[in-house]
Structures are given as structure tokens and as C-alpha cells.
């Protein structure tokens, strides 16, 4: 049987190694399609934004690491933040800028922003794509002011996560094939310990798409594919679950 970490990703135009950043250029037209390849990122962005309270001072700054095309932006409307997005992919950043994000092209392991500049740092579905994820954690914590909030979500380094997120999810229309390298999945206990090293007490909880909502969404999408109609934009909610074994969410405040 072929190893899932070594298999290739096909975006329709070329075949690339797993987790290759060039996939995001090939899939640039998918970012804002509610039924597209990045549909689940929309659902996760809504769940992540729910952890972010409204700003309490004028001009509070939210730094969105791995912002992609700015999917977090609609869910921050009315919360009062200046939204700065950092990403490597220019095609995604151009779309983020169209949605009100101040786009910064840069590496999440070496962010071109000053220490303590951020009231909130978001790192959504990023850590499992970065070989040196502790460096991203260090950068996220460096950017936070004392009392600032870190919010994130990622995939756990477990056999169950590899089964669900790669072997199963990549056969559904919610995750692009080859987008993950399971060797990069992030152990939840190690992540909590790494955040603590940098002064952030991270709490974690498991999350998943609501089963009934996901089933209805998949059915509508399949029906729309057969008829050529546009599927109704009724996205499944991301809900908490007891187990962190697959997908989990974290939040924590930087100590003074």
C-alpha cells in the first residue's frame, strides 16, 4: 500500500508533492466558493472567530497567520479590529485584500511585524502545514502583547487523525486531495507545552463538523453537481467534542 505521506496531490492542472504551497495557486479560484475545495476552512473560520471577543479599545490589532484569502474577515465584522493577514501565497493575499485585510506577504516562522504589536493572533489550520511549527508558536507569542489572545486550530498527531483527515476527508469534497502531509500533524500535549514556554496558557478542546449538517451539505452538493444548480449556502456548524484526537481548537492569553 502506498504511504499517504509520500503520495502526490493533483489539483487538476499539475501533480505536486503533499503539502506543496503551490497547490494554493492552483486552487486560487476555490477560496470563496461556499461549496468549493476550501469549504471546511469557512466553517472553521467561523468557529475560530467565535473565540475572539469584541475589541475594547480603538485600533486593536488582530494578526491572522496563514490567512489565506482572508476567510476570517467576514466573521470579524463589527468586532472593531484592524485585521492584518500574513501568508506566503500572493494569489491568496490579493483576495484577502479585497475583503478588507491588510495583506503582508511573509513566512509565519519569521513574521515582519514588531514584538507585542497584536491584541489577538489567529493561527487557523496553519501549524499542520509547517515543518517547524514550534517556530510559528514562538512567533505568534512574540507578536502578542501581555494580555493578548492566541486562537488556533489544527490536526492532532494521531493515527485516527491520519485516517480521518487524509484517507477519508480527502475523498470528500471538503478537503483538497494532497493538501496535508500527516507527518506534520501537531501533538496537542506538545503544543500546550510549547505555548507555556512562551507565556501562553493554552486550553484545547476537540471540534468537528456537526454530523447532520455535514450530511445535508454533502447531499445538497451532490445534487447540485448532478443538476448543475448552485447548492444552497447552508454550511455545517463546527461543534465541540470531547476528543481532541482528530481536530482541535486552542485559545489562551499571554502572561504579562
Image: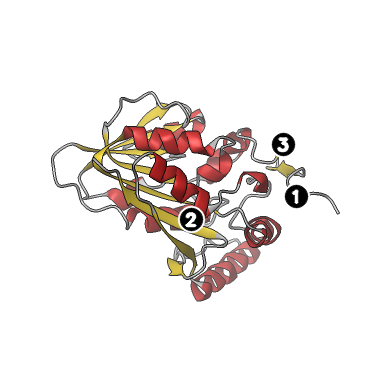
Quadrant for residue 24, please give it: top right
In this image, 16 relative to 121: left or right?
Answer: right
Quarter of the picture containing the C terminus is top left
- The residue that mark 3 highlights is 16
Q: Counting residues from the N terminus, which is met first, the one under dot 1 or under dot 2?
A: 1
Q: Residue at x 69, y 41 (%)?
A: 18
Q: Quadrant of the N terminus?
A: bottom right
Residue 51, given in percent of the width and then of the height, sits at 32, 56
Side of 228 relative to 154 (left or right): right
Badges 1 and 3: C-beta atoms under 8 Å apart? no
Which residue does the numbered mark 1 point to in the structure image? 4
Q: Is residue 54 above or below residue 235?
A: above
Q: Earlier in the sequence, mark 1 or mark 3?
A: 1
**167 to the left or right of 26:** right
Residue named by callout 2: 34
Disc nearest the viewer among 1 and 3 = 1
Amino acid at each position: 500500500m502506498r504511504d499517504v505521506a509520500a503520495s502526490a496531490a493533483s489539483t487538476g492542472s499539475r501533480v505536486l508533492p503533499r503539502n506543496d504551497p503551490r497547490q494554493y495557486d492552483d486552487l486560487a479560484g476555490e477560496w470563496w466558493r461556499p461549496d468549493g475545495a476550501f469549504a471546511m476552512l469557512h466553517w472553521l473560520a467561523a468557529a475560530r472567530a467565535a473565540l475572539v471577543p469584541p475589541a475594547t479599545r480603538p485600533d486593536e490589532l488582530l494578526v491572522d497567520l496563514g490567512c489565506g484569502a482572508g476567510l476570517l474577515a467576514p466573521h470579524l465584522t463589527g468586532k472593531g479590529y484592524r485585521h492584518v493577514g500574513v501568508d506566503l501565497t500572493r494569489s491568496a493575499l490579493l483576495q484577502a485584500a479585497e475583503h478588507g485585510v491588510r495583506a503582508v506577504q511573509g513566512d509565519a516562522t519569521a513574521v515582519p511585524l514588531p514584538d507585542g504589536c497584536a491584541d489577538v493572533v489567529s493561527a487557523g489550520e496553519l501549524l499542520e502545514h509547517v515543518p517547524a511549527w514550534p517556530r510559528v508558536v514562538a512567533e505568534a507569542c512574540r507578536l502578542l502583547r501581555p494580555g493578548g489572545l492566541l486562537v488556533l486550530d489544527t490536526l492532532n498527531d494521531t493515527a485516527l487523525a491520519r485516517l480521518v483527515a487524509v484517507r477519508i476527508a480527502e475523498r470528500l469534497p471538503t478537503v483538497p486531495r494532497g493538501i496535508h502531509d500527516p507527518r506534520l500533524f501537531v501533538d496537542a500535549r506538545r503544543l500546550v507545552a510549547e505555548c507555556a514556554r512562551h507565556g501562553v496558557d493554552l486550553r484545547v478542546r476537540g471540534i468537528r463538523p456537526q454530523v447532520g449538517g455535514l450530511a445535508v451539505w454533502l447531499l445538497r452538493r451532490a445534487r447540485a453537481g448532478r443538476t448543475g444548480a448552485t447548492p444552497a449556502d447552508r454550511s455545517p456548524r463546527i461543534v465541540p467534542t470531547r476528543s481532541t484526537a482528530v481536530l482541535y481548537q486552542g485559545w489562551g492569553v499571554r502572561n504579562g
